[in-house]
Amino acid sequence: MNSIANSIRNNQLIFFFILAFLLSWLVYLIPEFSSISLFGVALAAIIIAAIVKPQIIGKQTLKKWLAFLITFIITLIALYTISPLYSLPLIDIIISSLIVAYIISGGLSNIKGVRELLSKQYIWKVNVKWYIFVIIIVPIIYFLISIITDLLSGQPIQFQYTSYGLIPFFIFTLILNSFEEEIGWRGFALPRLQNRYSPLIASLILGVIWTIWHFPNYLPQLFSDGVIIFILICLAKFILIIPITFIYTWVYNNTRGSLLLVILLHAVGNFSVGLVLSPTLTSFNGLIIFDVTNGVIFSIIAVAIILKDKMWLKLPENSEATYKETETPVKS
């Protein structure tokens, strides 16, 4: 058993990526639990972090259990409220709520590795300009991309959600499309990649892996349009996702490794795209136009960020955006 644990400690990224894909893709193949598959990335990160640093650093405090209970109740109510909009089965709602509660309260965990990983959700004291970028500028960019996609496709511009549906839609994107991914990609993988490589190379590696992880989402196109269309859509996703990965890295590195900011960035991005109804996104041509338009605009932004931050240079060893084998535990 110790030899397995040592092997995982010496190859954390490899084991994390394998486990993340297994937990996500295998669950995704079960239609009744497909929405839970997104949690595979976060759960893989938590499992590996616990194996790497299994030391018990304190008792399970009342604060931790209260955080778990409050988060569980709020998430349960939120998911149950929006379930009619997204056809979420009750079992999905309950399991998702339990996982969300565990992850949110995990920053108070008594296991050292889990606490180090999940406590970064609580880093909120950063320069206000990052909140402005995430909450205001990013939605404007995505909104313009959606409009351009509609115009290029010759489709009418229309909004998908009324004001009544905005809050449920944001809750859905936050809980089931954002933070459970970022716990793994930016919380676990990026700091470890940046130990070995520059932010430029680390982002490129993570961007490729992150893109491939999304491939099961495009299986409907495989069954409806054939292998060639499926392959073209998957290739287009590299154009879409890789430039965005650099932007996520930029935000993470400049906010002291704040998972909160990248979680918000992810949620706001998905939320903004979904506001504008693009009938073309259900077709091959529409998907390609959207991905290429998105990729071109975000590639320009990514290049500017790379040059500004000199992302080809490795981060200093004391950077809070890199993983440290020995780290001071976060206080309860």
Image (cartoon, rainbow, N blue to C red):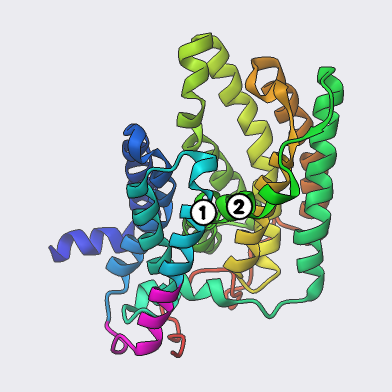
Corner quadrant of residue 30: top left
Report the residue at 50% width, 50% height from top.
176
- Which amino acid type is shown beneath numbered disc 2? Pro
Corner quadrant of residue 96: bottom left
- Which amino acid type is shown beneath numbered disc 1? Thr
Which residue occupies the foreground of this view, 325 or 79?
79
Residue picked out by circle 2: 168
The CA span between labels 2 and 1 is: 8 Å
Which residue occupies the foreground of this view, 61 or 86?
86
Q: Is 302 on the left or on the right of 182, as rendered?
A: right
Rendering coords of residue 230 (x, y %): 53, 17
Q: Quick check: is 59 in the magenta stretch? A: yes
Rendering coords of residue 66 (x, y %): 40, 82
The range drawn in magenta is: 56-70
Report the residue at 44% width, 89% height from top.
332
Residue picked out by circle 1: 81
Rendering coords of residue 22 (x, y %): 32, 41
Q: Is residue 195 visible?
A: yes
